[in-house]
Amino acid sequence: MNKYIKSPDSFASLSAKLLVKELGDEILDWEWEALWKAIYDRGVKLDDLGKVKVQSYLATSMNPIVVWEVNTFENIVLASNNVYPIPEITQDATPFELGWGLLELADYLYTTDIVQKHQKIKWGDDVLCYVAACLRENGWLIAPRPLEFAQEQLDKINQNTSLKSKVLFEWGRIRGGDLQSVKIPITDEISMQLRRLRDFSIYLSLKISSFRDHKKELQLK
């Protein structure tokens, strides 16, 4: 069995797809302990985080409740970011974790290119409110792609929306260029918002590139 699934750098959804590829679709009907034993018998021992990463995505194959049930959504977002989820509490994912988790989940659920897939998902109201609350908690005025579906809710709960149009204007001037070469000194609230958007975009771009490389190397669809 491919050792990729136990790598700390593995992508959760690709590990799940790899298991289905190697063991067959029937594993979706197995009890979890039977799956862990089958993996172990083939020479791979998963730690608790590795099991959660696989489990989160295989469970989504059977019941995509993740798109409207907020606790399930949070758990899969965290697992996608190599964070061990604790179902009994709310852990509040960061905007960066939300951005990548949402893209990886969309890639698992749909078959078009990863950067378009998130647009196909109709998120439930609880998930929408959760994303907006996480953004506000971290001081964000703009919900960047692929979190833009939460912008209207974010506007409702943000007390400082007067700067939003100014941030959008300045962001529109720089986002089409080479963001890694863009320097944004922190001088005021607008520059702070712009730096967050820049860093977020760079981070997701790097994650997408790495994800595509892993997917190609593993010969997964």
Image (cartoon, rainbow, N blue to C red):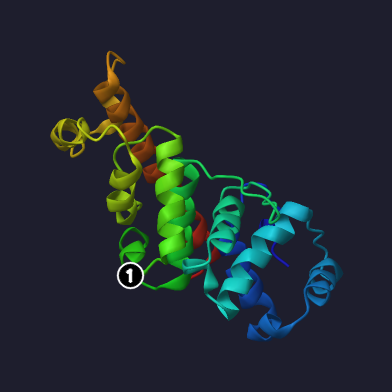
User: In the rendered image, which residue does mark 1 sit on?
Assistant: 120
* Residue 136 lies in quadrant: top left
The vertical placement of 110 against 177, above or below, is: below
The vertical placement of 159 against 9, above or below, is: above
In the picture, measured across the screen, residue 202 lies left or right of residue 184, that is: right
Q: Where residue 117 sits in the image (x, y, percent)?
A: 35, 65
Q: Where residue 3 sits in the image (x, y, percent)?
A: 71, 59
At 70% from the left and 81% from the top, the residue drawn is 27
How packed mark 1 is, by other alpha carbons closer than 10 Å (few <14, some 14-19, many 20 or more), is few
In the picture, measured across the screen, residue 83 lies left or right of residue 175, that is: right
The vertical placement of 5 against 132, above or below, is: below
Count numbered badges in the picture: 1
Q: Secondary structure at mark 1?
A: helix
4 or 169: nearer the viewer: 169
In the picture, measured across the screen, residue 78 lies left or right of residue 157, that is: right
At 71% from the left and 56% from the top, the residue drawn is 50
At 24% from the left and 35% from the top, the residue drawn is 161
Q: Is residue 32 shown to the viewer in this render?
A: yes
The vertical placement of 65 against 46, above or below, is: below
User: What amino acid does circle 1 point to?
Assistant: Lys
